[in-house]
Image (cartoon, rainbow, N blue to C red):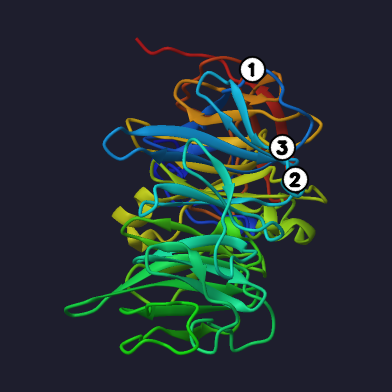
Amino acid sequence: MLRNQISEQDASYRDPVLGVNLRDGEQDLTNGEARLMQNAEYYGGIRMRRGSTRINSTLLGFYSVNGGIKFYFGGSSPQAKRLIAYSTKISVVADNGTETILTSAQTANLPTFFTTWSITDKVYVTNGTDTLRSYDGTTWATVAGTNIPVVRARAIPVIDRLLAITTNGIERTSPRDPTVWSANSSWATLRPQHPGLFTALYPYTLRGVDALYNGAIAFQERAHYLISGKDYGTDASAATASSGEDVSIQLLDSTVGTASPDSVCSVPGIGLFWFTTDLNVYWLPEGTLTGRFVGDKIQSTGTTPGIESAYKGALQHVWMAYHDHMLILSIPTGTSSFSSTQWWLDIRSLRTYPERGPVWYGPMTGQSVNRAWVENQQGNNQLVGGEGDPSLGIFVYTLRSASVFTDAQGVADTPISLTYQTNFKDFGTPSREKYIQAVHLDLNQFSGDATLDLVSLDGDIATGLAITQVIDG
């Protein structure tokens, strides 16, 4: 061995199994962490993220997509229709891109939420301004009946009824009946302990020793609550509760909430995640009522913007979706009114190697998807999103498309650019100056030109070095 040569073990870089870390100082990143994984994920090696393809080839107008869902219905004769919301419209967009407009009478450009309820085999549509709407696959209708609410955020099914947020609190329907609702009731309307409106609602079930307690997590901007019970009563419009009604609402935390209803996302077997008003990610593990922050590593203290750069004026456009072992968080940055930057949490790592803690990849740039939803029934298994940039127009995309390494943005297909920055290494001898004679790396590349930058804590050593291909044997 040559004198003063650094050992192979000290000089080599471990794969970034711990993901990206934007928070710690350059010299404090550990082996297995990366400073940057832009448009890259770790999956048996560092890989470029998959791209997207457009579903509709014809522009549907210069607006933003404000909501979407794949509505599965039909019982013994299963069918499916993809619904999107934009401008004043609710439309069906078929897999071949054909659009069918259901209505053009919605209040324009509002975040729109879709809820399917198997009991009625319908999808319910809310936007915080218009009265509750429904669609059964054939007929678009305004729900009529007793105390029909204007619902803020998303209505949710719990046991045999719907729950929904209004300006009075959280209202409920009668059993199996979406036409009878409570309205500012002394018993049926659930209210917060702190001033302010509820912002979001998500189903949540607690498992007791011999019973299930079906309910929900309710959010304010700075608090979250548990709603639970086994008997939600009979007639929701009655003046008094029926005997046996046992629903309660309990404050879980008075400091952690959300202003981003579409950011609340459940991961099977893992728990509930959401983007908090103070620009972090909170995790409530399944079966518990005590959560923790898991977004610290993607809160930046350096030059690469992290989730702390989310535009507070557009937090209602933050979304999360879980697909194929990745929890995808998308945020608006700068002063953008639509989501433009994604961060991916590796759920496979969290499940298999919990001692590693949260492993994030990103930022994922090049897409401007304003809403995304998973389509995973009747043979489907795909993540679909709607364009958020009104200058590009209304397009619906299949995201994370296999073997696609371009992003569909409007009518263009843009190549994805991957940037991977390792941690800074002291090579086992932090006080000694190093002379780098060669750099060896394994690289799989489909197209384009790869370059290498060498950077010390004092600044650039060399940038834009061309990588020469060498094939052993």
Q: Residue at x 51, y 16 (%)?
A: 446
Residue 268 x %, y %: 34, 55
Q: Quadrant of residue 417?
A: top right
- The circle on residue 461 is 3
Instruction: Please name the amino acid that badge 2 sits on.
Output: Gly
Q: Secondary structure at mark 1?
A: loop
Q: Secondary structure at mark 2?
A: strand
How far apart, in angstroms, are the residues tagged by discs 3 and 2?
Answer: 7 Å
- Mark 3 or mark 1: name the one nearer the start of the chain: 1
Q: Quadrant of the C terminus?
A: top left
- Does residue 3 appear in this view? no
- Does residue 185 appear in this view? yes
Residue 99 x %, y %: 61, 25
* Closer to the eye: label 2 or 1: 1
Q: How many badges with numbers are in the image?
A: 3
Q: Quadrant of the N terminus?
A: top left
Q: Are marks 3 and 2 in contact (CB under 8 Å)?
A: yes
Q: Quadrant of residue 312?
A: bottom right
406 shown above or below 376: above
- Which residue was labeled with disc 1? 57
- The circle on residue 232 is none
Residue 392 x %, y %: 77, 28
- The circle on residue 459 is 2
398 shown above or below 105: above
How far apart, in angstroms, are the residues tagged by discs 3 and 1?
Answer: 46 Å
293 shown above or below 43: below
Nearest the viewer among 425 and 362 is 362
Instruction: Please name the amino acid that badge 3 sits on.
Output: Ile
Label 1 Cα neighbours within 10 Å, binned few <14 / some 14-19 / many ≥20:
some
Instruction: Please name the amino acid that badge 1 sits on.
Output: Ser
